[in-house]
Amino acid sequence: MTKPLSEREIVLGILMDVTEHDVYSHIALGNVLSKYQYLDKKERSFITRVTEGTLEHMIEIDYILNQFSKVKVQKMKPVIRNILRSAVYQLKYMDSVPDSAVCNEAVKLAVKKGFGTLKGFVNGVLRNVARKMDEVSYPKDPVEALSVKYSMLGWILDLWLEEYSIDTVEKILADFQKEKPVTIRCNTSRISPEELEERLKAEGVTAVKHKYLPYAYSITGYDYLGEMESFRQGLFAVQDISSMLVGEIASPKEGDSILDVCAAPGGKSIHLADKLNGTGHVEARDLTTYKTGLIQENVGRMQFGNISVVQWDATVPDEAAFDSADIVIADLPCSGLGVLGRKTDLKYKTMKEQIQELSGLQKKILDVVRRYVKPGGVLIYSTCTISRAENMDNVHWFLEKYPEFTLDNIEDKVCSELKDSVTEQGCLRLLPGVHESDGFFIARFRRSLE
Ligand SMILES: C[S@@+](CC[C@H](N)C(=O)[O-])C[C@H]1O[C@@H](n2cnc3c(N)ncnc32)[C@H](O)[C@@H]1O
């Protein structure tokens, strides 16, 4: 049976959705993979690799195309632009596909899509790129060179360079492009880390202990998480090490009452419930029923009785909760600049203005949720971003506005390898490529007793 659509045509459809219609790549890709069930494993992995790779390297690809095409990328017809982009990705990054096949398939696809008159153009540009790939001249300016080499928007680089050296920024960028194993957290209320390691081994999965935490592992060698018995039974959760550090830094004691105000899909709430050893209580809140549903699903799978899930807008004060929590977790919505490596196209969709807007929303939420902390209690503020406006600037603003809160130093709550990630003020700042984690920020405030 001939297939209705070839893999490259499917890739083109996804790229059109993402670049022309503002759809997120993981959503477009997920939709396609579930729609075209006839695709085998190899075809699925080709589609995933070419789609994600093309988006990940898009600034560099456009730069290369502009060196070999008289018509600049932005002036090309969208279909042609995206056919050329995915072909250049294959030429530059996939040795397993012969150059001639890449060019021929791109030409065929252009004809199939109704651009027969442009087949000479597509063929000419791609044959040129294939022949002269090693002669591409990259920008001389060091920041522009980084932008092209790592396909990162200039304004994001400028923002980071205000705070970090160019070497550190390059480490961050290089790390974003690395393939990384998935990190998991053992559900220690159900199984010990050693027993989990054995279970994973029996399922054919390789688990390597993470050097930052004794109950965290990097896993490889599985096909699909949902098929793993140990996952379905809730013996572990997928969570980056940086997020686990929120639980470590919160360090609850048995019996504590914890309020997580932005909790979906529940990673940190469930970790804290695990740390409570069946005592105390965690209330996990989020904005919508869709989001609280995600928390419920994870709580059910991991089997915790000491969590309740509540739909609540964190910007709205809840008088009934005032002065009630030993620990408030404010893991707030942010620009996600610390996790750009996991979200290929987020970097192109994030706008400079959003940083200030998000910083405003974070202040608004902190303004409200600090009221839930008991006298003597703790407020944890965290984000998965590495922009000062959303991290240290907010910490300074908060301390100035609310003198009843002070920063607790968290140095004794992290392992020796992470001592250098504790800032002078005593907050945790993790940088990808510098630390073995996502980019992340954690501050621990304590409310005075009066
Ligand atoms: C960084 S994520 C939280 C991740 C979560 N803490 C975890 O570990 O799984 C931020 C969350 O804030 C939620 N959110 C955004 N605006 C909110 C609001 N006004 N009230 C409550 N939750 C909100 C989002 O739905 C999102 O789930």
Image (cartoon, grey):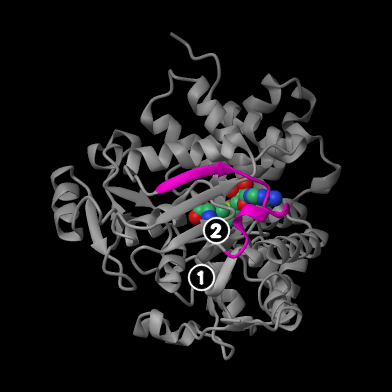
Q: In this view, does 342 lie to the left or right of 189?
A: right
Q: Which span of residues is magenta-colored? A: 307-323
* Residue occupying image coordinates x 54% and y 14%: 4
Q: In this view, does 101 lie to the left or right of 191?
A: right
Q: Quadrant of the N terminus?
A: top left
* Residue occupying image coordinates x 59% and y 58%: 340
> What label does residue 432 carry, if any?
1
Q: Does residue 322 belong to the magenta stretch?
A: yes
Distance between the alpha carbons at the discs numbered 2 and 1: 9 Å
Can residue 381 be seen from the camera position used here?
no
Q: Is mark 1 on a helix, strand or loop?
A: loop
* Residue occupying image coordinates x 24% and y 42%: 230
Q: Earlier in the sequence, mark 2 or mark 1?
A: 2
Q: 340 above or below 99?
A: below
Residue 132 in picture, x, y percent from top left? 63, 56
> What label does residue 341 carry, if any?
2
Q: Does residue 238 belong to the magenta stretch?
A: no
